[in-house]
Image (cartoon, grey):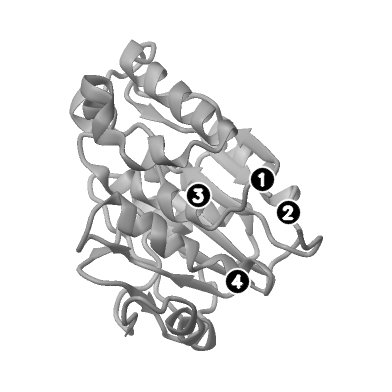
Amino acid sequence: MSTTRMPVLFVGHGSPMNAIEDNQYSRGWKEMGKNLRQPDAVVCISAHWETIGSQATGMEQPRTIHDFGGFPRPLFEMEYPAPGSPALAQRLREVINNTDVQIDLRWGLDHGTWSVLCHIFPLANIPVVQLSIDRSGDAQLNYDLGRQLKPLRDENILIIGSGNIVHNLGMLAWGEKPFDWAVDYDRRVKQWILDGEHDSIIHYEKHGSVAALAINSSEHYRPLLYVLGATEENEPVRFYNEDFFAGSISMRCVQVG
């Protein structure tokens, strides 16, 4: 295995407020950044951009998208002015060869991307391209798309998936301990990652009511599949932010490689 290969990251991003707060989650993201060498560019798959087919942002200067409501004004004033990379967007068209990746010039960086990158790479000086979540198929499709991203790791490009392993907004419990089912499924996924049992993670629908509660909608789970698809067997694994927010959101982050 190449000693210059970039690792891959999955970041449990939780509330947009983490972008402007100094808390255990934002400090964990800062630690992640300190443990990485600087990439030449970032490809981020965010839970908050779903399309039929795959799209990649191809503008020179992506806008900061404030895709939420009801939060304090300072959050809406937050900007993450990282450059884009039209060349990397074209490179994605080359490496993803089982579908025609469309170049998008309208989207930008949504909060699944900038709310974590502002802590991992606070200088906003590394080019960022968002790759959308393809919802035209099942979870296996997303994992297989991730497999095609592997060559980028040897080109000093960092692949990040941003979502949450357990994400059930309908059962938020402020100030309460995490639900047993949430802890159970989060721990199962951790062990499957350590054991390299990716099929168990891909076919989450086979795990009954626990998985149905943990993944009541899959957009926050699917970025993990892209990330795992881009890994090789027996790579080192490191976890950050092994905690829960509001009872039903796992903040677990994973670095592979």
Q: Mark 2–mark 3 contact, CB under 8 Å?
A: no
Q: Nearer the viewer, residue 11 or 20?
A: 11
Check disc 1 and report its element: helix, strand or loop: helix
Counting other residues with Cα less than 10 Å from the Cα at mark 4, is it few (<14), some (14-19), or many (20 or more)? few
Q: On the image, which quarter does residue 214 sit in?
A: top left
Q: On the image, which quarter does residue 188 sit in?
A: top left
Q: Is residue 72 in sight in this rendering? A: no
Counting other residues with Cα less than 10 Å from the Cα at mark 3, is it few (<14), some (14-19), or many (20 or more)? many
Q: CA distance from mark 1 to mark 2?
A: 7 Å
First in residue order: circle 4 vs circle 2: 2
Residue at 40 percent of width and 68 percent of height = 131
Kind of residue at badge 1: Met
Q: Mark 4–mark 2 contact, CB under 8 Å?
A: no
Q: Nearer the viewer, residue 51 or 204?
A: 204
Check disc 4 and report its element: helix, strand or loop: helix
Per the image, the residue denoted by label 3 is 228
Per the image, the residue denoted by label 1 is 32
Kind of residue at badge 3: Leu
Residue at 53 percent of width and 58 percent of height = 230
Kind of residue at badge 4: Pro
Q: Mark 1–mark 2 contact, CB under 8 Å?
A: yes
Residue at 46 percent of width and 53 percent of height = 161
Q: Nearer the viewer, residue 12 or 92?
A: 92
143 to the left or right of 49: right
Per the image, the residue denoted by label 2 is 36
Check disc 2 and report its element: helix, strand or loop: loop
Q: Position of residue 189 (x, y in %)?
A: 45, 30
The mark found on residue 151 in the picture is 4
